[in-house]
Image (cartoon, grey):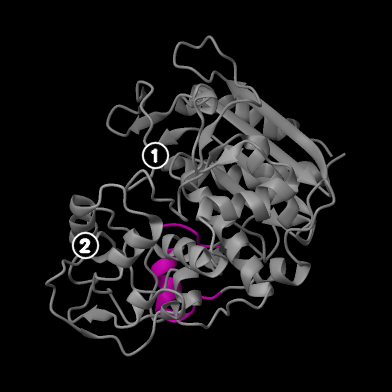
């Protein structure tokens, strides 16, 4: 293995894009074969990046939520094809807007409560929420959520998800793809099935078994003190603007735990999860969190037809979407194998799980609104990792 090209590339990112800090961990068969940190964790550039730094994981949370869901599926407590209403009764009678959502504004359109609609013909199933085909949106400011918060500022995850069910769907469940709050619905389902708060379930069934202490939905004051400075990329000026220590957490209420974005933690803590998945569900400490057959379900695509076209608009040309994760389906584009899976986050986190070669990659930066990270840096990092693995 020789990763000198990867190191050169990572070290060039500050000069090319102004990326102030990053951390990369590559594992193969329970061994860390590459680790590179560069930059500073504070805006004053007095604190070099270290393994103690905390990052907001944003949508990288989704991979952990899907791991929790898959645990319940393999335990026989839920099926992919169960209607969500089996566990959350508020989801029994759903409506679908009458208009074509693409002509109403496409990916930017979010319906109102009084949008003309009709009863859905299809039920919203677990697989629909996992695969983003439920007809939901990512509207965190919907009328139903606002009404709930006005009455109950400390509403729970279950209560917020019940409010989400009041909003009309964009399309018949199972027919199209729209990036949405489906993983948040899954978090509420996990609570209903397990009888535990979502964060407690993650702690008991994933983090504690793997020996993880620095991955959480609720940072302590000590953990907040280790939070890496977060930036926003200004596309007009091409500058990285520090958010002055503010903490933009995906949190509708203090008690709401988002299955799509709640986690914060260190790179090492998150990489312990991806490493376990890359090794058939077994962590470095020998603890199994999933059966290998369950892990392999993540390597299969769900989307076809128009739904797949929806997903691939603008990027992800070599990928489809599966059970809550992107799945590589093209053997020509990119260096990773067909079936590699993972996801990314709003601040630039990027997870790759390859259970065929027992390889995992976790790249993390802390920059919002930096789209070149997804379209250029992430695939380049992935490909340089695989080149490095194959070189002497």
| Magenta span | 302-318
Q: Nearer the viewer, mark 2 or mark 1?
A: 2
User: On residue 16, which mark appears?
Assistant: none
Q: Judging from the image, what secondary structure is the residue with disc 1 in?
A: loop
Question: Which residue is at 45% across, 11% downward?
Answer: 44
Q: Are marks 2 and 1 in contact (CB under 8 Å)?
A: no
Q: Provide residue 358's location: percent of width, then percent of height.
A: 79, 55
Question: Which residue is at 19% across, 53% downward?
Answer: 151
Count up the numbered dots. Answer: 2
Residue under label 2, please give it: 144
Question: Which residue is at 58% across, 80% downward?
Answer: 79
Does the rendering let one see residue 192? yes
Residue under label 1, please give it: 249
Q: Residue furthest bottom?
A: 121
Q: Provide residue 206's location: percent of width, then percent of height.
A: 67, 53
In this rendering, is residue 91 above or below 22? below
Instruction: For marks 2 and 1, give the CA distance.
Output: 21 Å
């Amino acid at each position: 293995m020789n990763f000198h090209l990867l190191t050169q590339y990572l070290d060039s990112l500050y000069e090319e894009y102004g990326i102030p800090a990053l951390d990369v961990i590559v594992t193969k068969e329970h061994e860390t074969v590459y680790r590179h940190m560069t930059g500073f964790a504070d805006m004053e550039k007095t604190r070099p990046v270290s393994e103690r730094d905390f990052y907001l994981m944003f949508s990288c949370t989704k991979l952990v939520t899907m791991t929790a869901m898959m645990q319940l599926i393999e335990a026989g407590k839920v099926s992919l094809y169960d209607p969500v209403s089996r566990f959350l009764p508020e989801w029994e009678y759903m409506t679908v807007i009458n208009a074509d959502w693409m002509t109403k504004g496409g990916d930017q359109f979010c319906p109102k409560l009084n949008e003309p609609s009709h009863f859905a013909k299809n039920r919203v199933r677990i697989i629909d929420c996992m695969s983003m085909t439920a007809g939901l949106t990512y509207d965190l400011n919907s009328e139903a959520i606002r009404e709930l918060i006005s009455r109950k500022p400390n509403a729970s995850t279950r209560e917020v998800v019940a409010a989400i069910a009041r909003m009309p769907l964009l399309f018949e469940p199972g027919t199209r793809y729209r990036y949405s709050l489906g993983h948040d619905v899954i978090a509420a389902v996990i609570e209903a099935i397990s009888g535990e708060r979502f964060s407690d379930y993650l702690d008991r069934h994933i983090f504690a078994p793997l020996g993880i202490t620095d991955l959480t939905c609720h940072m302590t004051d000590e953990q907040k003190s280790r939070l890496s400075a977060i930036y926003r990329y200004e596309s007009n000026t091409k500058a990285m603007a520090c958010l002055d220590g503010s903490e933009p957490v995906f949190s509708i209420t203090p008690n709401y735990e988002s299955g799509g974005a709640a986690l914060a933690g260190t790179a090492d803590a998150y990489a312990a999860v991806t490493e376990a998945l890359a090794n058939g569900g077994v962590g470095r400490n020998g603890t199994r969190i999933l059966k290998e057959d369950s892990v392999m379900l993540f390597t299969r695509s769900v989307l076809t037809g128009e739904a797949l076209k929806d997903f691939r608009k603008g990027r992800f040309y070599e990928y489809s979407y599966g059970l809550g994760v992107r799945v590589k389906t093209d053997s020509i584009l990119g260096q990773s194998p067909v079936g590699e899976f993972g996801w990314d986050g709003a601040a630039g986190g990027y997870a790759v799980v390859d259970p065929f070669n027992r390889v995992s990659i976790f790249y993390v930066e802390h920059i919002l609104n930096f789209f070149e990270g997804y379209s250029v840096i992430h695939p380049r990092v992935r490909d340089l990792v695989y080149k490095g693995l194959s070189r002497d």
